[in-house]
């Protein structure tokens, strides 16, 4: 028997199927994908609502750490982050969706994605993240970066674009992505330098990374 709930579920499955298909085609043909207004609305709305009720103290400065890199990091990035785990319903729904994408990409592109980690990021007006790579060649760690945006009614002159550069040339911008609500971006972590430009208003995103299994005989890599 079809209930309206079952119909809704199958609609979500169809939306995901075509979205995952577009994303895989883009990654295969050019190494990155930008899909405006693509995150299923139950996730985009749920994640946005969660951000509205989340206490500000849950965010930690991304440039702060106990390590020696702390000073350097503040020149590189000034945003604040909060890691996402399965402790909340929406966190679990997000991780379920990213796991479905992981399985789809492994089937289609044989990427061997093994685990996923992600955090909310808050960029206050003027915050930035200078040009960087999410992974370094040969370190077999982060393979695919995924970013989604949670900013309703973003205007072009609000700034805050994600600039993705050509793999071979950090002077040539390949695309400038407006951080509009429910836009999904994915790119090969080792290949595309990118940066976040300052915005004139608060900017919220989720950044996540799929990793390979880098477990060795004497060192087990737990999936995060
Ligand atoms: C990152 C990142 C991009 C963005 O966190 O590594 O590049 O647009 N984020 O928030
Ligand atoms: Mn990055």
Image (cartoon, grey):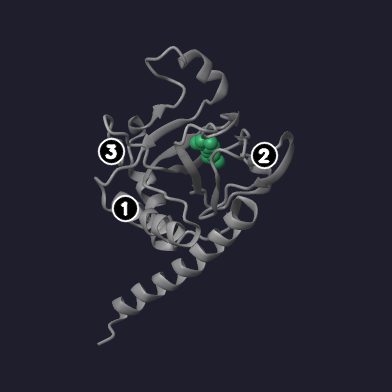
Tell me which corner region of the image, top left, top right, bottom left or bottom right, holds residue 115. Answer: top left
Crowd around label 1: few <14 · some 14–19 · many ≥20 (10 Å): many
Of residue 174 and residue 151, the one placed in the foreground of this image is: 174
Q: CA distance from mark 1 to mark 3?
A: 23 Å
Image position of 35 with respect to 158: above or below: below
Of residue 224 and residue 175, the one placed in the foreground of this image is: 224
Q: Secondary structure at mark 1?
A: helix
Residue at the disc numbered 1: 90
Q: How many marks?
A: 3
Q: Residue 112's mark? A: none
Residue at 38% x, 31% y is 59
Q: Which residue extends farthest front?
A: 217
Q: Quadrant of the N terminus?
A: bottom left
Crowd around label 3: few <14 · some 14–19 · many ≥20 (10 Å): few
Of callouts 1 and 3, the N-terminal one: 1
Between circles 1 and 3, the one closer to the viewer is 3
Percent x, y for residue 195?
Answer: 61, 34
Q: Secondary structure at mark 3?
A: loop
Residue at the disc numbered 2: 167
Residue at the disc numbered 3: 222
Residue at 59% x, 54% y is 33
Q: Quadrant of the C terminus?
A: top left
Answer whether residue 45 is visible to the viewer in this image: no
């Amino acid at each position: 028997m079809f209930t309206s709930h079952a119909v809704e579920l199958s609609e979500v499955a169809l939306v995901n199927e075509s979205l995952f298909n577009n994303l895989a085609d883009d990654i295969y043909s050019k190494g990155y994908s930008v899909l405006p207004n693509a995150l299923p609305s139950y996730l985009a709305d749920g994640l946005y609502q969660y951000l509205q009720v989340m206490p500000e103290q849950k965010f930690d400065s991304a440039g702060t750490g106990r390590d020696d890199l702390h000073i350097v990091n503040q020149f590189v990035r000034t945003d604040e982050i909060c890691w996402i785990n399965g402790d909340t319903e929406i966190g679990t729904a997000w991780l379920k969706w990213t796991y479905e994408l992981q399985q789809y990409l492994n089937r289609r592109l044989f990427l061997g994605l093994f685990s996923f980690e992600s955090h909310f990021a808050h960029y206050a007006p003027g915050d930035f993240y200078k040009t960087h790579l999410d992974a370094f060649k040969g370190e077999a760690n982060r393979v695919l970066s995924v970013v989604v945006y949670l900013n309703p009614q973003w205007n072009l002159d609000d700034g805050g674009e994600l600039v993705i550069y050509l793999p071979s040339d950090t002077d040539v911008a390949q695309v400038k992505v407006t951080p509009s609500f429910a836009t999904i971006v994915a790119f090969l972590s080792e290949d595309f330098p990118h940066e976040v430009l300052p915005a004139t208003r608060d900017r919220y995103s989720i950044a996540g990374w799929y990793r390979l299994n880098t477990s060795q005989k004497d060192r087990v890599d737990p999936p995060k």
